[in-house]
Structure formats: C-alpha cells, structure tokens
Image (cartoon, grey):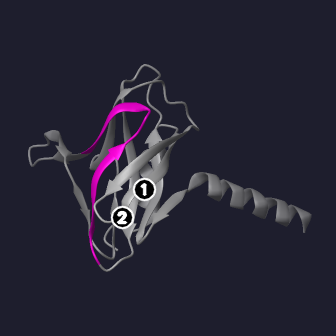
Amino acid sequence: MTRFLGALTALLLATAAYAHEFKAGDLEIIHPNIPAPAATARTAAGYLSVKNNGSAPDTLIGITADFAKMSTLHESRVDANGMATMSGMKTLEIPAGSMVSFASGSLHIMFMGLKKPLAEGAMLPATLKFRNAGDVAIEFKVEPTGKAEHHSAHAGDPTN
C-alpha cells in the first residue's frame, strides 16, 4: 500500500509539473512553454493552447514579456512548393466553444531581443492581452528542446 501511495504521489507531482494552466473568464490558457534556446540565442518561440469555453469569440491582441524586448504573434506556413514563410499577426481570434493551439511550424509567439539566457525549468512571466478578457498573467515554462513544442497537442483536439 505504501508503494502504491508513493507511486501515486509521484505521478500526481509529475503531472502537475508537466501541465499548467491559467483561467480568465471563459478562457483557459493551457501549458505555455518555450523550448530552451541556445544560451547565446537572441530569440525564442513560445507555444500554448487557448480554449474558449464561452458563447462569444475573443481576440488575442498582444503579448508582453519582461524577458524579451519584443513579443509578437507569428504564423509559419509551407506553400505548395515547399517554401516555408513566417509572418507576423496583429490579432488572433479565439472562436467561441473552440481551442486554438500554438505549435512548431504553425502559430507561435516570437520573443525577440532576449534579455538573458533562458534556463531549462525557468518560469517566465508574461501577459496575454485579449479584447474581451483583458490582460491575463501567465508563466511560460522553459522546457528541453524537442519536448516543449509538442505539449500543445496534449491539450486536446484544436477543432473542439
């Protein structure tokens, strides 16, 4: 019984460390994360999922983060010829009753002009700005490269 309780406690602690979320009104911000960039990197990409449990859409209109000089929304695309492009976005609508997931190769947040190296395990405060929900304080977890960008897929089907 003691082994079972010990294993259960370890599992619960690992789950809590793995996933974190923030709520603001009808919005849930699920597992904001940044793959650990090289120590000399000046940029980093951030990923998360936003679930809108409400009956009206909301719009992500910006992000601020003290650990970077500039934070912007971006979308990567690959055209029919295999050419990858990345473009900035001013806003991103989060439809009512759905989830939008940021992931490598698609939607992401670019943190430019990093003010210091981002160490694995660090929790970095940021603020998402929504048209209706207002400012939502969150923390991005810096995770090992290759692991972090895949977390948004664990949040659920983005078509929900």
Q: Is residue 11 left or right of residue 113?
A: right
Query: Which quadrant of the rendered structure holds the N terminus?
Result: bottom right
**Vertical order, 68 against 149 (above or below):** above
Residue at 83 percent of width and 60 percent of height: 6
Q: Which residue is mark 2?
A: 133
The stretch of residues the image draws in magenta is 56-73
**Vertical order, 93 against 108 (above or below):** below
Secondary structure under tag 1 reads strand
Residue 132 rendering spot, x and y as whole percentages: 31, 65
- Is residue 146 visible in the rendered image? The answer is no
Q: Marks 1/2: CA distance?
A: 8 Å
Residue 30 rendering spot, x and y as whole percentages: 46, 59
Quadrant of the rendered structure where residue 121 is?
Answer: top right
Q: Report crowding for label 1: few under 14, some 14 to 19, many 20 or more residues within 10 A (C-alpha).
A: some
Q: Are marks 1 and 2 in contact (CB under 8 Å)?
A: yes
Residue at 64 percent of width and 57 percent of height: 16
Q: Is residue 116 left or right of residue 45?
A: right
Q: Is residue 67 magenta?
A: yes
Quadrant of the rendered structure where residue 110 is?
Answer: top left
- The numbered mark at residue 136 is 1
Name the residue type under label 1.
Val
